[in-house]
Image (tube, rainbow, N blue to C red):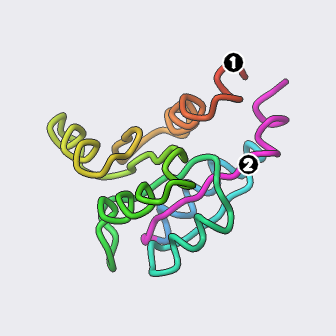
């Protein structure tokens, strides 16, 4: 099966408060047939995660209303949500930033901005078991 065929059954949640970044990431996944849920990281984010149970969450770290690190910790504190892979998406690009964010938040991986669409797709494929052997 192709990525586009498998992706029809998968949901990506994008937690990003910058509208242009939100739209850029959304387009990457819409083009591959993923279902996409958007949120700006507001107070309803955890409720949206509970409602949609996404296959992966892409989390901006520098949100306006709350730290992405704190939001990741909150999501991971729920037993029914802790296995959802969360990928930190951030402009912090130094090696020690990567380690700090993963260690402080408990996220599953990290990608720094700017990124290529193929790198974002590869990152998500790495964390969704059904996609590991899909081209």
Residue located 57% across and 55% down the image: 80
32 sits left or right of 98 in the view: right
User: Which quadrant would residue 102 be assigned to in this image?
Assistant: top left
- Between residue 77 and residue 49, name the one nearer to us: 77
How busy is the neighbourhood of tag 2: few (under 14 within 10 Å), some, or many (20 plus)?
many
User: Which quadrant would residue 118 be assigned to in this image?
Assistant: top right
Residue placed under numbered mark 1 in the picture: 133
Residue located 53% across and 52% down the image: 57
Please state the horizontal and vertical placement of residue 112, each as a whole percent of the image. Answer: 34, 43
The furthest residue to the left:
96
Vertical placement of residue 67 versus 57, above or below: below
- Between residue 129 and residue 98, name the one nearer to us: 129
The magenta span reads: 1-18
Please state the horizontal and vertical placement of residue 35, each as a whole percent of the image. Answer: 74, 55
The quadrant of the picture occupied by the C terminus is top right
Looking at the rendered structure, the number of numbered marks drawn on it comes to 2
60 sits left or right of 98 in the view: right
Residue placed under numbered mark 2 in the picture: 34
Please state the horizontal and vertical placement of residue 115, each as a whole percent of the image. Answer: 42, 41
The quadrant of the picture occupied by the N terminus is top right
């Amino acid at each position: 099966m192709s990525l586009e065929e498998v992706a029809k059954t998968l949901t990506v949640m994008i937690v990003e408060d910058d509208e242009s970044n939100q739209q850029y990431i959304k387009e990457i996944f819409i083009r591959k047939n993923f279902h996409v849920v958007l949120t700006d990281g507001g107070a309803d984010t955890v409720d949206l995660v509970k409602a949609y149970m996404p296959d992966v969450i892409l989390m901006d770290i520098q949100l306006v209303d709350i730290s992405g690190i704190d939001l990741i910790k909150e999501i991971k504190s729920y037993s029914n949500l802790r296995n959802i892979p969360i990928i930190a998406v951030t402009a912090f690009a130094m090696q020690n930033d990567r380690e700090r964010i993963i260690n402080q938040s408990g996220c599953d991986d990290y990608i720094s901005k700017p990124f290529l669409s193929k790198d974002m797709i590869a990152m998500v494929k790495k964390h969704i078991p059904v996609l590991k052997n899909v081209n």
